[in-house]
Amino acid sequence: LETADGVDHALERISAIRDAVGDDCFIGVDFHGRVSKSMARELVCRLEPYNPMFVDQPVLPAHSELLASLREQTTVPIATGEPFYSRYDFKRLFVDGSVSVIQPDVTHVGGISELRKIASLAESFDTAVIPHCPLGPVAFAASLQVGFCSQNVVMQEQDLDLHDPASSERLALLEDPETFEFDGGYIERPTGPGLGIDVDEERVRERAQAEVNWYNPVWH
């Protein structure tokens, strides 16, 4: 649970962002499942005046049964799906009308084919798709393959420093870090063979020898 002052502080931050970017810009709010069910309900409803594009993962997948009732109580679109692993995880949400946006991850659901099936299933329920992809250029290129052939993929997440390819550690895994042509929030469709990218395999082998800390941070 959160204090009234804590909730007000969160709303002040969203208000400041809305004032800074104006109304002609989308704002997404990611709860990341870090609040309780009761607090999620209060926060989502109080966000309405700021017109967020969606609230992502207001609760953890273990509490997905809350999403249908939450959607009925607010005008804010509800999104979830990054920790899901197949179209069957999404099926109940579609049938219940629980979400307006899903965020499947091509590396979680098993590749391009399953992601395409999930997007097609979502389209039949008039649900938008924003593929989750805070990873490297291979996952990003795979997500784009689905995005460019799916009517309901409306945005694509990325974390590649596309605005400055020369400084991006992830884009350095490609033979040409400037493979993706990115301009004003839009990206040109890659037209090369396969995924449209060439991986620098020697650099990948070199990086694979480095010690990696796979432990998630502990939140209190």
Image (cartoon, grey):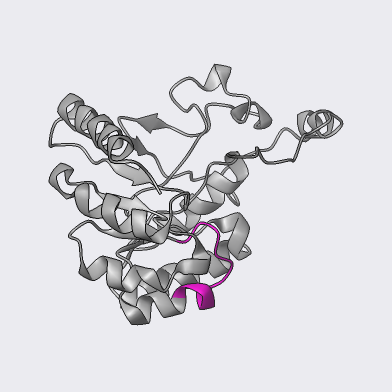
Residue occupying image coordinates x 59% and y 39%: 219
Q: Considering the image in quadrants, where does the C terminus appear?
A: top right
Residue 120 screen position, x and y as percent: 40, 72
Residue 75 screen position, x and y as percent: 17, 59
Q: Is residue 117 above or below residue 23?
A: below
Viewed as shown, does residue 120 lie left or right of 197? left
Q: Is residue 124 above or below residue 37?
A: below
- Give the farthest residue toward the front: 3
Residue 177 at least partly seen = yes
Q: How many discs appear?
A: 0
Residue occupying image coordinates x 57% and y 23%: 168
Residue occupying image coordinates x 13% and y 45%: 49
Residue 153 at least partly seen = no
Residue 32 screen position, x and y as percent: 46, 49
Residue 154 screen position, x and y as percent: 31, 53
Viewed as shown, does residue 21 lie left or right of 140? left
User: Which quadrant holds residue 77?
Assistant: bottom left
Q: Magenta stretch containing residue 83, yes or no?
A: yes
**Magenta-tinted stretch:** 81-90
- Give the farthest residue toward the right: 209
Of residues 201 and 132, the one nearer the viewer is 132
Q: Is residue 135 above or below residue 107?
A: above
Q: Magenta stretch containing residue 84, yes or no?
A: yes
Q: Is residue 152 above or below residue 179?
A: below
Tell me which secondary structure the magenta stretch mostly adopts: loop
Of residues 35 and 31, the one nearer the viewer is 35
Residue occupying image coordinates x 29% and y 35%: 5
